[in-house]
Each structure stands twice: as structure tokens, then as C-alpha cells.
Image: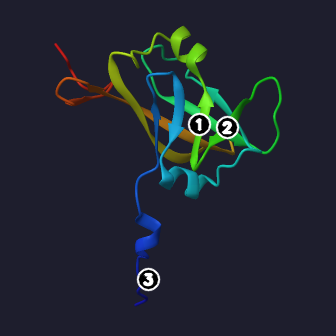
Amino acid sequence: MEISFFKPKDFEGNMKATIHITGKLGFTDAAIKKIGLNEKKGIKIGHNTKDKNDKNLYVVFTEELDEDTFKINKAGAYYYVNTKALFDSMELPYRAKRVSFDIIPTEIGGIKVYKFMYKEKLKADDKETDDDDDLS
């Protein structure tokens, strides 16, 4: 038998991103550390074109910026992406609800991708909902 012990530092905080009322996408400290975010990186944001009901985002972090890449910005210890126009075009309800994403590392077609799993919370009572919930 071989026992491998878990390291608490590997489980400190969840990787999350939240859409702020300004439309900017901000990251938790855990996401910043685990992904290694910095101002020199960019982020490519995609969606599932085969399933219009899939509100999850699919993200690749890049070392270089190009026309398909959003720039990662920094204010103090806070990292964010200017995504207001994107989220407005997607008609995400970030002004009326608390919209966030759990960040799950995965691989699609041999490429390291982060699945941003869509979540909503009603601002009034903070009851959480997501795409899989039956709200009827």
C-alpha cells in the first residue's frame, strides 16, 4: 500500500470569477494564484456554438495579446477583464443579479481550457440558481 497525503494549500479557496455591476470580470485570489494571472497575459473567451442553452464560457489564458484576446488588467491586487460589451451582447443579467462562474480546469481537443460554469444569485435573497435548475 502507498498513501499520499493531501496538501491543504492545494485546496485554499475556490477558483471563481464574478461579473461586477460595471461589466468587468474579476477573479478571486485563488484563481489569480492557481492560474498565475498577470498583466502580461490575455484571455480568450468562447462559448458552445452547438448548444444555445449552454451559458458556460470556455476560456484559454495566453501569454500574448492578439485581436482575439482580451487584455488582463490590474488595479491594486485585483485582476479584471473589460468584458462589459461582451456580456451586454450576451444579455447576461449582471446588473439585476449576481453572476459568477466556478472555474474548472479541463482539456478540450488537446488544449488546456478553463470551463467557467455559470451561476446566478438573486440580489434580494442571494438564492443561487444555475442553468440546470428548473425554475418553473
Query: What residue appears at the point 42 percent right and 16 percent down from the top-left corner?
Result: 53
- Which of the marked residues, 2 or 3, is nearer the chain's N terminus? 3
| Camera-side residue of 1 and 32 | 32
Observer able to see residue 131: yes
| Camera-side residue of 109 and 75 | 75
Q: Percent position (x, y) of residue 65?
A: 81, 34
Q: Is residue 121 left or right of residue 36?
A: left
Find residue 16 and report its image quarter. top left
Is disc 2 placed on a helix, strand or loop? strand
| Camera-side residue of 123 and 54 | 123
Q: CA distance from mark 2 to mark 3?
A: 38 Å
Q: Of the residues shown, which amino acid type is indicated by label 2?
A: Asn
Q: Eyeballing the image, is 96 above or below 11?
A: above
Q: Is residue 44 left or right of residue 64?
A: left
Q: Which residue is mark 3?
A: 4
Residue 40's tag is none
Q: Which residue is mark 2?
A: 73
Q: Nearer the viewer, mark 1 or mark 3?
A: 1
Q: Are marks 2 and 1 in contact (CB under 8 Å)?
A: yes
Observer able to see residue 49: no
- Which of the marked residues, 2 or 1, is nearer the chain's N terminus? 2
Find residue 50 and report its image quarter. top right
Q: Of the residues shown, which amino acid type is indicated by label 3?
A: Ser
Q: CA distance from mark 2 to mark 1?
A: 5 Å
Query: What residue appears at the point 19 percent right and 30 percent down from the top-left corner?
Result: 127
Q: Which residue is mark 1?
A: 80
